[in-house]
Image (cartoon, grey):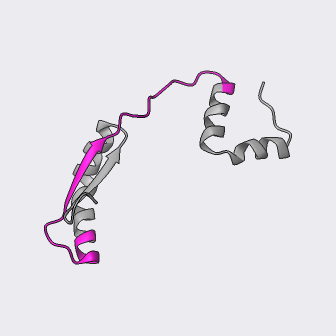
Amino acid sequence: MENDHTVRIHLNNAAQKDLFIQNYRQKLITLLENKFLISDLDIETNIDLTEKDDLLYTDEQKYNYLVNKYPVLKDFKKSFNLDFS
């Protein structure tokens, strides 16, 4: 929430923003207004460009990306003695 009547949502790309605005924005506004008894609620969307989209080519690059995102994967690989070739 930015102020009492504005909610800011960060999205990854323009396609997500368009989809959100066309299909979900009004439904979310209605839900939040009814749930929290707020009138004149507005939702602003921003495209978050901080994450860069590197293409992952090798199995090792994919694995390292997933381990950074889900650290438990490292233990999983070790527990089941998994390896990529």
Q: Give me the residue at 34% from left, 44% from top.
A: 11
Quarter occupied by residue 43 = bottom left
33 up-or-down from 42: above or below: below
Residue 12: percent from left, percent from top: 37, 40
Region in magenta: 32-60
Of 36 and 58, nearer the camera is 36
Of 24 and 48, nearer the camera is 48
- Which image quarter holds the C terminus? top right
Query: Going by the picture, which residue comes out furthest to the left?
Result: 40
Residue 3: percent from left, percent from top: 22, 61
Residue 83: percent from left, percent from top: 81, 32
Of 2 and 75, nearer the camera is 2
| Magenta stretch encompasses residue 48 | yes
* Image-based side of 33 in relation to 40, left or right: right
| Magenta stretch encompasses residue 59 | yes
Quarter occupied by residue 29 = bottom left
Q: Give me the residue at 33% from left, 43% from top.
A: 16
